[in-house]
Structure formats: C-alpha cells, structure tokens
Image (tube, rainbow, N blue to C red):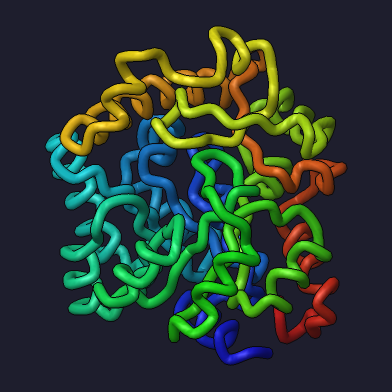
Amino acid sequence: MKPATQQFLQDTGAKVPIVCGPMFPGSNPELVAAASDAGGFGVVQPVSLTSLYGHDFREGLQLIKQLTDKPFGVNFTIFGGANKKYHEKMKEWMEISIEEGVKFFLTSLGKPTEIVKIAQQHDIKVYHDVPNKKVALAMRDLGVDGLNCINWRGGGQTGIQSAEQFMEELHDVGIPLICAGGIGNTADFQKALDMGYAGVQMGTRFLATHECKVSNAYKQAIINSSEADIVWTNKIAGNNSSMIKTPDIMKGGLRTGPIISYMLTKKKLKKYARMYLMMRGLKKYSQAAFDDKVQFWQAGKGVGHIKSIVSVADVVKEFAGGLGMNESKAL
C-alpha cells in the first residue's frame, strides 16, 4: 500500500480508501453509517441531515454513532458573508461535531482558515475540495491535511479538469490527494490509485444502494443511464453541475438567464447569485429525493458502470476485492 493511502487511512480511520461523499440529497444517516461500518468512510452533509431528513444535528450524529462504532466525517460548505444565518449555523454544527467526537472535516468552497485553526486545536483532520492547482496549493499552505480533487467526471457540482491533470500538477504537493469524480467500478478505483491518488470519493455509486433513502425512480435512473446521459448546467449553483438528462432538467435550457449570468461575472455579486441558485436548487433536490415524478437527479459520469442496486457493504467489499485486499484485514 502506498504511503499516501496509508496516510489517508490513518487520517480517517477507514480500512478501505473509499469516501462516501456528502450529498444533497443522499446523505441520510443510515447511508453514512453503513459506509463507515463497511470499512469505507462516510461523510455527513449537514443540510441533508437536518433540512432534508429532519434530524436535529446532534441527534443525527448520535444516530450514526448508534448504527456504527466506526469513525465518520462532517462536511462544511463555506459561503463567507453571503448568508450570515447559515454561517452561524455552520459554527454551531462544528461545535457539536467536536463535542460528539468527530475527527475529520471535509470543507468546501471559501477559505477554511478558522476551521483549520479550530480543528488543529482538537486533533481533527481537515481535507478541502479543490478545483485546480492554484486553489490546491493555497489550501496546502493554509494547513489542510489533504485535498479532495473535484474532477470533471463528478456528479453534482463538478470540476473543470481531469483526474490525470490533477495528478500531473499536484503529484509532489506533499499531502494526500483524493480522486473525486467518475468512479463507478473497481477498474476506475484501481486506475485512480495507480495514478497516485490516496483514495477515491464516490457519490453516485452510493446513491444506488439499499441504505440510501432517495426515491426508487432516482436509483433506477442511475442504473438505466450511460455517460452520454449526463449533462452540465450552471442553473443549480452558478458553476457546472452534472445531472441526468431529463425533461425537468432541459426545461428552459441548461444555462442561467442574462441577469444571473451577469452577476456571476462580478466578484462582489457572484456569491449572492450562487447562494440564490443553490437555495432554489435545494428545493428541487428536496422534491426529487422522495417524489418519483420530479426528475431532478444529480449523477456523475461513472453511471455507465453502475448496473444494480446493492447494499453499501457489497459495494465496499467488491471494491476492496478488486484491489486484492485481504477481506479480514480490510473489512
């Protein structure tokens, strides 16, 4: 096992270098717990946990701890001053996470300066989502412990460059790199590790599992789709989001109108435009999570390799087996 993978497993407490990425919708506590319990690593998406699945944040973390004694992480999306109410809620969630013994934070967007400072005081590891080399180096210098490299094959808010380009540019960065995007089978997993990644983050594969509580129509759409069925739209979050092509997604086109498009080009307005789009998108995602008739489905380009709905344990076992990992040691 390569040193980067060993470091990632040490940072998370996982046995297999697979992260069940934070998703809205998708990150119900049963899914997060199942991923960690199987030997991978589940990450909580706080808005999913609270707004979508209706749990008090602390009670939701405690439920996960009842379902597994394995470690799990929490994701914090940083919107800066665009939404002060959300920022205060995020601080509260972080304090609760620390009190409940969480030892891994995955941060997204913004600069996690304060989060890193607080995490270091409590021996918590911080990995940050990055879209390119410039941001990656800035985050490394800020003190994060690892980088979640969001490539262009991912579902939901996707990246703009390939997994290969990330590795070419960051192979000597000195901290673990996670390949996030397009991992649908063991061959994809092996390829990422062979390139030098410490592990992978998957979302779409874990949506099509028994433990995930999204609608059956959503799961079937993943199984029935190919890579060619994935389209990009900036109407969800201001940057490209990968979605399954449906009439709901194609209605009105895939790009924002002139006013929002203008705001997205202006530094002082961009965060407000993105916040508006994301809040509107969350409403659609909430409906799609449970209503078969709302065809508003995030998915990555790994869908072509996903052919069945299985248990989370079976997913992790299959991937570990594909690496030739000893099951008794890995799981």
The picture places residue 251, in percent across and down from the top left corner, at 59, 9
Q: At x 49% / y 20%, what residue is drawn?
A: 255
Q: Position of residue 113 (x, y in %)?
A: 19, 65
Establish if 184 lies above or below 210.
below
Which residue extends farthest top?
A: 252
- The quadrant of the picture occupied by the C terminus is bottom right
x then y, percent, for residue 15: 63, 78
Eyeballing the image, is 55 above or below 297? below
- At x 67%, y 66%, the residue is 38
x and y, in percent, of residue 304 in the image = 82, 43
For the question of whether residue 183 can be seen, the reply is yes
Task: Give the camera-side residue of 16 and 69.
Answer: 16
Give the quarter of the image for residue 56: top left
Total tally of numbered discs in the picture: 0
- The answer to whether residue 34 is above or below residue 164 is above
Query: Looking at the image, which residue is at 55% across and 20% down?
Result: 254
Q: Residue at x 62, y 53 (%)?
A: 181
Left or right of 113, for residue 303: right
Q: Is residue 124 visible?
A: no
> Which quadrant holds residue 111?
bottom left
User: In the displayed structure, does residue 39 sit left or right of residue 43?
Assistant: right
The N terminus sits in image quarter: bottom right
Q: Is residue 260 left or right of residue 290?
A: left
